Image: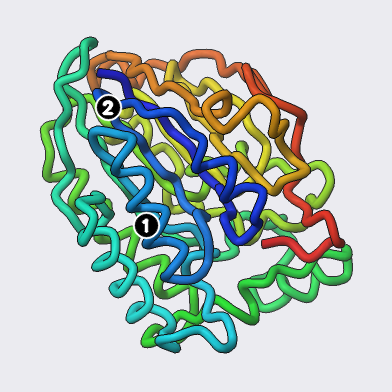
């Protein structure tokens, strides 16, 4: 069996929906779906139905778009209630979610635990001289506005920061409960390391790209690979001997449709090392857009409102 990863399908765009339907089957393999599949329960439901028919097992984590409360949607849920509803939709198709026990897969390289994470962000990926209370204004002054400020509601939490903190604390406890020497694939919509949240075209979008709470988790929890999306900048970064895969497909203009969606699946090959070996620093390296299509940006084609 093989483990594949993909994110940011953005199926609200008809071109992406049609292309996904042409994806060939991988009946022996697993798919890690790292968020921003679409907004809207009906499209997400249809996507799960399609992909579970093509892969042995699908694992999903939500991105920010799944959590958008869009006007005229039914039911009009938001925050935790919306997330829990989407988890039920996923489970109805046998899709694994961050609320399920982490599965241990018998990979050809050895047993590996797959940890789907839902961690959100807390605006901490910002310059040190910018306070939390000023970060949204600072981004706007640089021409960047995030749709989450209008559409992603944290209720019943008072703010997204608090929701993020609760999610991180829960994930830390769950990861720590597993054997330290068991290799783990960490799957999250957002990058776990601030140094990977680099967006040359919209540099002030980083506050919506993760949390400093996850710094060093790849060493702490013996990760053999990390999978994320959100940035729409495909590639692999190596840090401490661990591959960090950004696996976005992106908006229609950000990938080469004649190649098909299958060309953008990223195989996740576990880099097996012990927990002690993970603590030995190794020089980092990066490979951007490896084996993928045209280099995408994280900016919407229509402007600088980023999602």
Residue tagged 2: 27
Relative to 76, does residue 142 appear above or below in the rendering? Answer: above
Q: How far apart are marks 2 and 1 (CA)?
A: 26 Å
Q: Which residue is drawn at 27% across and 54% down?
A: 97
Look at 68% across and 72% down and name the residue there: 147
Q: Which of marks 2 and 1 is in front?
A: 2
* Numbered label attached to residue 118: 1
Quadrant into which the N terminus falls: top left
Query: On the picture, is 36 further left or further right than 146?
Result: left
| Residue 55 left/right relative to 101 | right
Residue at image position (72%, 31%) is: 256
Quadrant assignment for the C terminus: bottom right
Is residue 130 or residue 40 the one in the foreground? 40
* Picture quadrant of residue 86: bottom left
Q: Is mark 2 on a helix, strand or loop?
A: strand
Instruction: Give me the residue at 27% from left, 55% from top.
Output: 98
Q: Badge 1: few (under 14), some or many (20 or more) residues near its Cα, within 10 Å?
A: many
295 in relation to 130, above or below: above
Q: Considering the numbered disc 1 on the image, is that residue within a helix, a strand or a loop?
A: loop
* Image coords of residue 39 (percent x, y): 52, 67
Looking at this view, name the residue that lies furthest to the top: 109
Residue 174 place in picture, x, y as percent:
18, 51
Q: Indicate the position of residue 27 as horizontal and vertical percent values.
A: 27, 27
């Amino acid at each position: 069996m093989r483990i594949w990863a993909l994110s940011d399908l953005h199926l609200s765009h008809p071109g992406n929906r049609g292309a996904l339907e042409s994806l060939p089957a991988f009946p022996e393999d697993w798919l890690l779906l790292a968020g921003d599949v679409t907004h809207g329960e009906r499209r997400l439901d249809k996507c799960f139905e399609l992909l579970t028919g093509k892969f042995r097992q699908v694992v999903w984590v939500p991105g920010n778009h799944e959590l958008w409360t869009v006007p005229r949607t039914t039911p009009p849920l938001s925050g935790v209630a919306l997330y829990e509803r989407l988890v039920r939709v996923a489970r109805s198709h046998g899709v694994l979610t961050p609320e399920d026990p982490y599965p241990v897969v018998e990979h050809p390289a050895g047993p590996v635990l797959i940890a789907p994470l839902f961690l959100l962000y807390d605006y901490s990926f910002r310059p040190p001289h910018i306070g939390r209370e000023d970060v949204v204004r600072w981004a706007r002054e640089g021409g960047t506005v995030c749709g989450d400020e209008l559409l992603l509601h944290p209720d019943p939490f008072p703010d997204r920061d608090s929701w993020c903190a609760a999610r991180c604390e829960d994930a830390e406890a769950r990861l720590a409960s597993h054997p330290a020497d068991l290799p783990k694939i960490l799957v999250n919509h957002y990058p776990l390391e601030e140094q990977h949240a680099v967006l040359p075209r919209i540099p002030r979008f980083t506050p919506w790209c993760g949390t400093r709470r996850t710094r060093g988790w790849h060493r702490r929890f013996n990760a053999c690979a990390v999978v994320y999306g959100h940035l729409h900048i495909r590639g692999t970064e190596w840090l401490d001997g661990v591959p960090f895969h950004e696996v976005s497909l992106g908006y229609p203009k950000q990938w080469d449709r004649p190649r098909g969606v299958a060309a953008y699946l990223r195989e996740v090959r576990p880099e097996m090392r012990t927990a002690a070996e993970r603590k030995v620093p190794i020089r980092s390296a990066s490979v951007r857009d490896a084996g993928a299509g045209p280099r995408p940006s994280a900016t919407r084609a229509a402007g600088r409102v980023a999602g």
